[in-house]
């Protein structure tokens, strides 16, 4: 059985919770103001696609491929990114809400998170080498046995990263962010 192939499509305002997205390959497609909340996107391949102002809250993304995909001002609440197809995985997030999502054990190098809310996100045992967290809210986010080498946290805030439990060689932090590395010592820095 062959997959359906879609290329160069612009889709606006579609509620995919009512109109199920066909399993197939979607290349160079743009989605704007679409609702994917609580939908099953398993086994769908998104290649060179962009999503803007879309809601993916609690969507199922088992074996979903995201190759060079950009999310802009999207709600991605409670997603299990560890279930996606890892082959050529490449994502970019701008002004997105990723709260309560999980990237458990995911190799996710050189990923850009810009102006995102990452409250209570799980990055346990992930590889985020070279990733950029630009102006991101990180309250309650879990970094445990995470590779953060050369990651950039200089403009992010409210993070707690234990240098003894994570690999942070050459990671970048601002002077204000240093407190996020010392949280477990319960000290006051003035």
Image: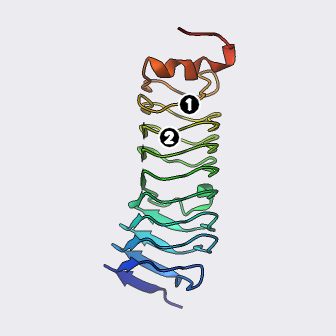
Residue at the spot x=46%, y=64% of the render?
66
Residue at the spot x=53%, y=52% of the render?
97
Residue at the spot x=45%, y=44% of the render?
109
Residue nearer the viewer, 102 or 90:
102
Classify mark 1: helix, strand or loop. Answer: loop
Residue at the spot x=58%, y=68% of the render?
63
Q: Residues within 10 Å of mark 1 (few under 14, many from 20)?
A: some
Q: Is residue 47 left or right of residue 86?
A: left
Q: Are marks 2 and 1 in contact (CB under 8 Å)?
A: no
Q: CA distance from mark 2 to mark 1?
A: 18 Å
Q: Is residue 16 left or right of residue 120?
A: left
Image coloring type: rainbow
Sequence-first disc among 2 and 1: 2
The quadrant of the image that shows the N terminus is bottom right
Residue nearer the viewer, 63 or 100:
100
Q: Residues within 10 Å of mark 2 (few under 14, many from 20)?
A: many
Residue tagged by mark 1? Answer: 158
Give the vertical position of 86 relative to 180 (above or below): below
Q: Position of residue 26 (x, y in %)?
A: 41, 77
In the figure, residue 5 lies in which quadrant? bottom left
Which residue reaches farthest left? 8
Q: Position of residue 187 (x, y in %)?
A: 65, 10
Q: Position of residue 181 (x, y in %)?
A: 57, 21
Q: Is residue 174 left or right of residue 185?
A: left
Give the vertical position of 10 relative to 183 (above or below): below
Residue 128's disc number: 2
Q: Position of residue 179 (x, y in %)?
A: 55, 18
Residue 69's disc number: none
Q: Nearer the viewer, mark 2 or mark 1?
A: 1
Classify mark 2: helix, strand or loop. Answer: loop
């Amino acid at each position: 059985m062959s997959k359906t192939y879609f290329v160069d499509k612009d889709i606006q305002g579609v509620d995919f919770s009512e109109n199920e997205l066909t399993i197939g390959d979607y290349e160079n497609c743009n989605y704007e103001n679409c609702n994917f909340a609580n939908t099953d996107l398993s086994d769908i391949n998104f290649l060179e696609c962009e999503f803007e102002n879309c809601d993916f809250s609690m969507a199922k993304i088992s074996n979903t491929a995201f190759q060079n995909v950009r999310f802009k001002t999207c709600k991605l609440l409670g997603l299990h990114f560890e279930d996606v197809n890892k082959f050529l995985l490449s994502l970019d997030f701008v002004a997105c809400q990723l709260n309560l999502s999980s990237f458990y054990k995911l190799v996710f190098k050189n990923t850009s998170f810009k102006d995102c809310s990452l409250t209570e996100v799980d990055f346990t045992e992930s590889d985020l080498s070279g990733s950029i967290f630009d102006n991101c809210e990180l309250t309650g986010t879990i970094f445990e046995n995470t590779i953060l080498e050369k990651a950039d946290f200089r403009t992010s805030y409210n993070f707690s990263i234990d240098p003894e439990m994570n690999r942070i060689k050459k990671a970048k932090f601002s002077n204000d962010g240093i407190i996020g590395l010392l949280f477990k010592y319960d000290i006051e820095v003035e």
